[in-house]
Amino acid sequence: MDGKQLKQALHSGGLVFGTAIYAPSPMWARPVSQLGIDMVFIDSEHTPHDRSMISWMCQTYAALNMAPVVRIPEPDPYLAQMMLDGGAHGIIAPYVESPEQVRVLGGAVKYGPVKGDKLRGMTHGGAAEAELEDYLAQRNARNNLFINIESVPALEALDDILAVPYIDAILVGPHDLSCSLGIPERYEHPDFEEAIRTIISKSRAAGVGVGIHHNFMRQQIRWVKSGANLVMHSSDVSSFVRMLTREFQEIRAAVGADSGAVREQSVNL
């Protein structure tokens, strides 16, 4: 799936499958391509990857028919344009809490390379010249904008955020959201579930994709049945830790070794 196909699926309500990839190894991309997923989530908020490495990852996964979507460190339009220039098919903007942030990001993702006063006019209802409008539509056709909803203020502003026309998907950051709700990592808590149901219903009503980046299948299945159409499941790091933890526990138990130091864990990135 490329960025154009990704955008169509997100808006139409089709199921989209993706995972987060943190490892930059050249040995990693082809096995990931065998998972049958549609997109990869490449993070630059919580990783030490530089611009060159992220561009290499974007180009590689795009060549293997998985749309690369990059989370930038902060909701900044210049960082968004930088990642798109490097080959990203979409941008994930973290911790967005206002419609104006979405408007500024949308200008970079949907109207690049226009900047300055001309861009501000376009994102506030001004019309572009017909030739420029056609050029921008073609140039940015594969670009997707994902908005991370990760806080109570974002929940409270969700209707206004979704009213801005540039969003292709809402992606919930469950760890940060649970902390903002005052119930850290209590993903079964009624307040957390109510927040998720609200985000799903409002996003789908607005015609944009919606999903939750989470590590565990039971929750993912429940959320899809509630209307989510973006299955952003786990990451290479989390899956590696979970699987090897279980296997080492099994080996230790079989040979009578002490297994007290080994425990299953999640990785919040």
Image (spheres, rainbow, N blue to C red):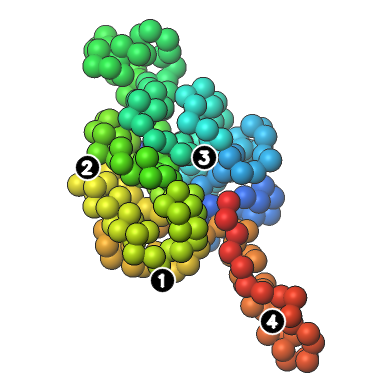
Residue positioned 36% across, 40% down in the render: 154
Amino acid type at circle 2 is Ala
Left/right of residue 79 with respect to residue 246 in the rendered view: left
Q: Which residue is mark 1?
A: 218
Image quarter of residue 260 = bottom right
Q: Position of residue 90 (x, y in %)?
A: 44, 37
Q: Earlier in the sequence, mark 3 or mark 2?
A: 3
Picture coordinates of residue 134 (x, y %)? 29, 18
Q: Is residue 77 left or right of residue 152?
A: right
Lower sequence index among marks 4 and 1: 1
Q: Residue at x 36, y 31 (%)?
A: 98
Q: For the point 33% across and 30% down, which residue is it?
A: 99
Q: Which residue is mark 4?
A: 249
Q: Which residue is mark 2?
A: 206
Which tag, 3 or 1, sits closer to the chain's start? Answer: 3
- Please state the horizontal and vertical placement of residue 231, each as a whole percent of the image: 40, 57
- In space, the residues marked 4 and 1 are separated at their CA atoms by 22 Å
